């Protein structure tokens, strides 16, 4: 916790470049840092070692944090522990940003976010969901009420592809698909746009990274007739050549 507020999050969804760069990976397997991280933090929760760290002295300063993804949550917790009064604003119905709305449950269940929120609430962080700064709440109101404002919004604009057929029905961005699925599981309104379901459909996922894999897993769970994943990079070798691939 001295360098990472939320090891239960990173231990589950971080791509772990540290493992790829581990020197043991030259000739053997790397230290399983993610697995170790999750094991330690979950043991800490089970044993009651992880408790609210309430500030001993208050500064009298009021801080607004706008955006409740991992950066906003970590910032809010650190500021509260320093003695400031912190309000964390989120435009969506629930706290967590893309951890809540972009990461599928099969990678990280959302009760881990709720558990950490309970600790933060005990430390003095106030959560304000359904609060879109500049839309439902004037920026001037935030500037008047707080001594400082921290902007921790995420990057929500996807990279488009200018290819023939891009405008056809049934072509969607990954975050449109994944966000709808998380809203569906949270029993929330799906938001603007048509409902996106892969049930009984032949699905093509363009992109072989983590987000593409999330779309593949979600499509399979919807009961897609078939799922094909396309990747621009060449297929990696069946067996790793340690002498040539370190560091990744």
Image: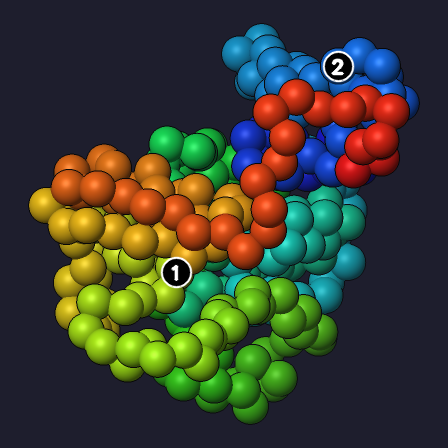
Q: Which residue is mark 1?
A: 175
Q: Is residue 102 above or below residue 112?
A: below
Q: Is residue 100 above or below residue 17?
A: below
Q: Residue at x 47, y 39 (%)?
A: 113
Find numbered disc 2 in the image and state the secondary structure of the residue it sits on: loop
Q: Which quarter of the figure is the N terminus placed in?
A: top right
Gap between marks 2 and 1 measured at Cα: 33 Å
Give the numbered dot on residue 143.
Answer: none
Q: Is residue 225 visible?
A: yes
Dot placed on the residue nearer the N-terminal end, 2 or 1: 2
Give the numbered dot on residue 29.
Answer: 2
Q: Is residue 57 above or below residue 155?
A: above
Q: Is residue 130 above or below residue 75?
A: below
Residue 67 in the image, given as x and y percentages of width and height:
54, 64
Q: Residue at x 77, y 58 (%)?
A: 59
Q: Residue at x 10, y 45 (%)?
A: 200
Q: Which quarter of the figure is the C terminus placed in?
A: top right
Q: Closer to the camera: disc 2 or disc 1?
A: 2
Q: Is residue 49 visible?
A: no
Looking at the rendering, which quadrant does residue 237 occupy?
top right
Which color scheme did the rendering employ for the protein? rainbow
Other-residue count near label 2 (Cα within 10 Å), few / some / many at <14 / 14–19 / ≥20: few
């Amino acid at each position: 916790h001295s360098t990472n507020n939320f090891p239960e999050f990173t231990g589950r969804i971080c791509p772990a470049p540290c493992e790829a760069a581990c020197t043991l990976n030259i000739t053997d397997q790397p230290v399983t840092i993610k697995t170790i991280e999750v094991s330690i933090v979950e043991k800490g929760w089970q044993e009651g070692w992880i408790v609210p760290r309430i500030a001993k002295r208050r500064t009298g300063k009021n801080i607004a944090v706008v955006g409740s993804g991992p950066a906003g949550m970590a910032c809010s917790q650190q500021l509260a522990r320093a003695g400031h009064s912190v309000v964390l604003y989120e435009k969506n119905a629930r706290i967590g940003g893309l951890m809540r709305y972009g990461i599928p449950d099969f990678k990280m269940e959302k009760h881990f976010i709720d558990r950490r929120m309970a600790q933060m609430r005990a430390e003095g962080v106030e959560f304000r969901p359904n609060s879109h700064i500049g839309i439902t709440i004037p920026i001037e109101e935030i500037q008047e009420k707080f001594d400082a404002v921290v902007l921790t919004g995420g990057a929500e604009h996807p990279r488009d592809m200018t290819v023939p057929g891009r405008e056809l029905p049934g072509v969607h961005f990954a975050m449109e698909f994944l966000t709808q699925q998380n809203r569906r599981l949270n029993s929330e309104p799906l938001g603007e746009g048509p409902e996106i379901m892969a049930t009984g459909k032949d699905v093509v996922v363009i992109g072989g990274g983590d987000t593409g894999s999330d779309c593949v897993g979600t499509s399979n769970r919807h009961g897609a007739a078939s799922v094909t994943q396309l990747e621009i990079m060449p297929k990696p070798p069946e067996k790793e050549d340690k002498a040539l691939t370190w560091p990744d």
